[in-house]
Amino acid sequence: MATPKFKKQIETMLAENKDLFSEYEKLEENYVKNPSKYKEELGEMRRKLLRIMRKHEDRLCARTENTKYANYSENLAMLFWQDIRAIFPNVEKTI
């Protein structure tokens, strides 16, 4: 079975930003150990990652948003974010 479009976009995003996502995971671990030291750094990293994620969501949905496939686009975005939240559950949380 073919890989869904939103999963391909997530794979592309993760591959293009492998180092950044790896750094984020380390920051998450460090934040748990010492919140006051890593609070600002983790917050800035989350903002960077959210910009990247939104850019990839836009790439995924750009061609269908203003067409008769707008509902499809909305569902695609929802599935994209569900998978993102499964991989990075805290990325949207503010500190």
Image: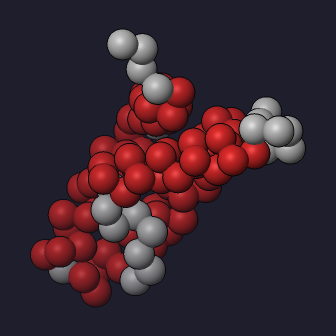
Residue depicted at x 69% and y 47%? 71
Which of the two residues, 16 or 77, is positioned nearer the viewer here? Answer: 77
Across and down, in percent, residue 11 comes to 42, 29
Q: Is residue 41 visible?
A: no
Residue 54 lies left or right of residue 28; in this view the side is: right
Which of the two residues, 80 or 42, is positioned nearer the viewer here? Answer: 80
Q: Quadrant of residue 76?
A: top right
> How many numbered markers are drawn?
0
Across and down, in percent, residue 43 comes to 45, 73
Q: Quadrant of residue 31?
A: bottom left
Across and down, in percent, residue 32 comes to 17, 74
Residue depicted at x 79% and y 33%? 63
Residue 59 lies left or right of residue 87; in this view the side is: right
Residue 48 lies left or right of residue 69; in this view the side is: left
Q: Is residue 34 above or below residue 1?
A: below
In which quadrant is the C terminus drawn?
A: bottom left
Q: Is residue 6 visible?
A: yes
Q: Quadrant of residue 57?
A: top right
Which of the two residues, 71 or 23, is positioned nearer the viewer here? Answer: 71
In which quadrant is the N terminus drawn?
A: top left
